[in-house]
Amino acid sequence: MGFRQDHLLGIEPLAPDEIREILDLADDYVALSRSADKHADALRGLTQINMFFENSTRTQASFELAGKRLGADVMNMAVAASSVKKGETLIDTAMTLNAMQPDLLVVRHPHSGAVDLLAQKVNCAVLNAGDGRHEHPTQALLDALTIRRKKGRLHRLSVAICGDIAHSRVARSNLILLGKMENRVKLIGPPTLMPSGIAELGCEVYENMAEGLKDVDVVMMLRLQKERMDGGFIPSEREYYHLYGLDAEKLAHAAPDAIVMHPGPMNRGVEIDGTLADDINRSVIQEQVEMGVAVRMAAMDLLARNLRARRQAA
Ligand code: ASP
């Protein structure tokens, strides 16, 4: 059947075979990225524009490197210095960029749904690099690749996603992906950080780390997203760490070979113990970053193939 998408706006629209296709191709790009000559020409002749309306370290660098490794011309639009600050609307900015004939537009935006809206207005492939609390599809895909390589499979695993679920697009995208691939997902966090009705998405909800972590194969920690909180969601960081911060003691409830993940940026001593985060026997946080480049190469390659086919047919 093949990868059928024109854009990568979320995990929601993807079928399991499309997820597998991205991950299989990403495996090849991991090998390429580890070789001496890291170049391929899947995106040669194409223009990629990265528009980040919200701060990013890892994701923007990762998309930039991914595009360059595949031979695209990559431009990072400095949004802070752009007309957006002068009051131009998102759509006007997008239309201006569209007139420059980009082929791939990578967009991060603080509002949920903004990237979908933009994709309807432009005639190139759009990749969502995170929109508000909605989705962060390449993060879920890089997490899936990391899990699949570490655990040897991506189904029938028990995965705990812990912490600030309510504000997290990473949690949402992962929850959807892991569900599609038939895994057991357990969400753990204080009730104030748990969206109401979330259990309807087919996951189990826990308030207590010891209970929720019992025998899980994967522990995903999330950052406390204070920038998205407008009130007292937690009593204090110290108390939060005591109850929900992952340390060796809490991890002991998980399976003995459970892996520890975090999308970054990490708050050491808030949601995760610094020593555990650096423990190469349990933590795969650095691998996640490596997989991020490969997954973005794969996603852009597959989208570019469909874009070329569409243009040829037109
Ligand atoms: N980097 C991830 C995101 O952009 C997670 C985080 O910010 O905590 O959603």
Image: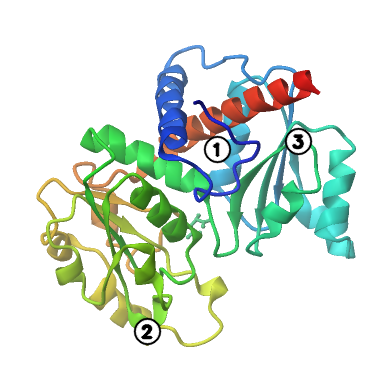
Quadrant of the rendered structure where residue 84 is?
bottom right
Residue 124 is labelled as 3
Spot occupied by residue 19 in the image (x, y as percentages of width and height):
44, 36
Secondary structure under badge 1?
Answer: helix
- Above or below, 264 relative to 23: below
Determine which residue is flagged by label 2: 236
Which marked residue is nearer to the observer: mark 1 or mark 3?
3
Question: Residue 118: in sight, yes or no?
Answer: yes
* Residue neighbourhood size for the residue with mark 3, other residues' Cα within 10 Å, grouped as few (<14), some (14–19), many (≥20): many
On screen, residue 149 versus residue 167, left or right, reads: left
Quadrant of the rendered structure where residue 227 is?
bottom right
Residue in front for this viewpoint, 99 or 71? 99
Residue 279 is labelled as none
- Say if mark 2 contacts mark 1, CB within 8 Å: no
Count of numbered circles on the image: 3
Residue occupying the point 46% across, 40% down: 15
The kind of residue tagged 1 is: Ser
- Above or below, 84 relative to 303: below
Spot occupied by residue 98 in the image (x, y as percentages of width and height):
85, 40
The kind of residue tagged 2 is: Ser
Residue in front for this viewpoint, 172 or 231? 172
On screen, residue 247 versus residue 122, left or right, reads: left
On screen, residue 8 versus residue 280, left or right, reads: right
Secondary structure under badge 2?
Answer: loop
Determine which residue is flagged by label 1: 62
CA distance separating discs 1 and 3 = 20 Å
Spot occupied by residue 86 in the image (x, y as percentages of width and height):
89, 63
Secondary structure under badge 3?
Answer: loop
Cβ of mark 1 under 8 Å from ligand 1: the answer is no
* Residue neighbourhood size for the residue with mark 1, other residues' Cα within 10 Å, grouped as few (<14), some (14–19), many (≥20): many
Spot occupied by residue 100 in the image (x, y as percentages of width and height):
88, 35
